Amino acid sequence: MNAHVPISYPAAPRIARRRAWLRGMAWFCAALVLSIIGLSAHMRLSRVDPACQPWPQCQQAQALDADAPGAPPAARAAHRMAASAALLLVLAMLAVALGPRPILWPEGRMALGLLGLALFLAVLGMAAGASALPAVTLGNLLGGFAMFALSVRLATRRTRVGHGRLAVTAPHGFRLALLLALVQVALGGLVSAGQAGLSCPAFGACDLGAGGWQAFNPWIEPAAGTPPTHAGGAWLHMTHHGVGLALAVMLAMLSWRAWRRGARAFAAVLAGLPVALVTLGLALVALGLPLALVLAHNLCAALLLALLASAPDCYSPVPDAGP
């Protein structure tokens, strides 16, 4: 049986223009949020002066030292400007989606979600400041990644209608992959905030007997001067590795299915990003957590979440080639 191909009906010119404006603003918002994610990670990880050596061993001690210098002023200023611009852009998207009639409810709901995330991040920043508590790191990380993914989802949304309703084309496996990716991001945030990045000096070389489950508790702040090589984060580090490998296998299967159904560009990126993440993760441990690779790993994870969130509109199925 051939797969049903949904029929597209052209929207009225005025509605089409509004949707085009929303897509453009959503792409701009995604770019701003991606820059905020990078700046935020840089500020959190390098709250030290450039002479702090060796990194990352000195990072934790200086981050908890009241007399140590904070993040570079230029980075702080750029972060504030990008965050303010993103908030204004979200308000503009709300006005375009929900102001004139007819109200564009699908886009409006996503814009409301962006507003909620932006306000949550703003309140968290004001309330927690530069706290080293892992829960604060998780809030910033997951909030920023979710805001980026939702911006890309809004930017890539298509309005194909078949039998009177929006045609959702991506298989349910993408929802599970998105959930697993969120879990993996949270584990990565705990590894970073808990100074467990080098708890396993090589893949599988962990002192699990010295590891503890308290590393999974985001409300326990690591002690001052805790080195990233401490064995207490071994279980957390291995769990992060294990979930990452499971996610890579799942994404390889979804990529192969998307390739067979004709969404080849989407399939290629879906297969490439997990490979890049695994390679960067192994390189991070082998090279002692160089800051540039930490930031690259962070941004690749954000791109993967955005890709999975936009799967319903990037994945265009055609009949399977073969039985």
Image: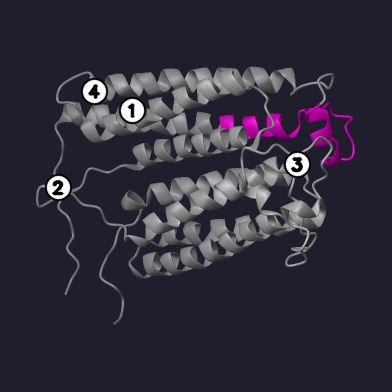
Residue 6 coordinates in the image, percent (x, y):
17, 55
Q: Upstream in the sequence, badge 3 or badge 2?
A: 2
Residue 320 coordinates in the image, percent (x, y):
29, 73
Q: Does the magenta portion include 165?
A: no
Residue 164 coordinates in the image, percent (x, y):
10, 47
- Residue drawn where x is 85% and y is 29% of the image: 50
Label 1's element?
A: helix
Distance of label 4 from label 2 (alpha carbons):
20 Å
Q: Which residue is mark 3?
A: 291
Distance of label 3 from label 2 (alpha carbons):
47 Å
Residue 96 coordinates in the image, percent (x, y):
28, 22
Do the residues under discs 3 and 2 have CB atoms within 8 angstroms? no
Q: Amino acid at mark 1?
A: Leu
For the view shown, which residue lies furthest in the bottom direction?
A: 323
Q: Is residue 167 above or below residue 218?
A: below
Label 4's element?
A: helix
What range is drawn magenta here? 36-64
Q: Which residue is mark 4?
A: 98
Distance of label 1 from label 3 (alpha carbons):
34 Å
Marks 4, 1: nearer the viewer = 1
Q: Amino acid at mark 2?
A: Arg
Do the residues under discs 4 and 2 have CB atoms within 8 angstroms? no
Label 2's element?
A: strand
Q: Residues within 10 Å of mark 3 (few under 14, many from 20)?
A: some
Q: Which residue is mark 1?
A: 112
Camera-side residue of 17 and 99 = 99
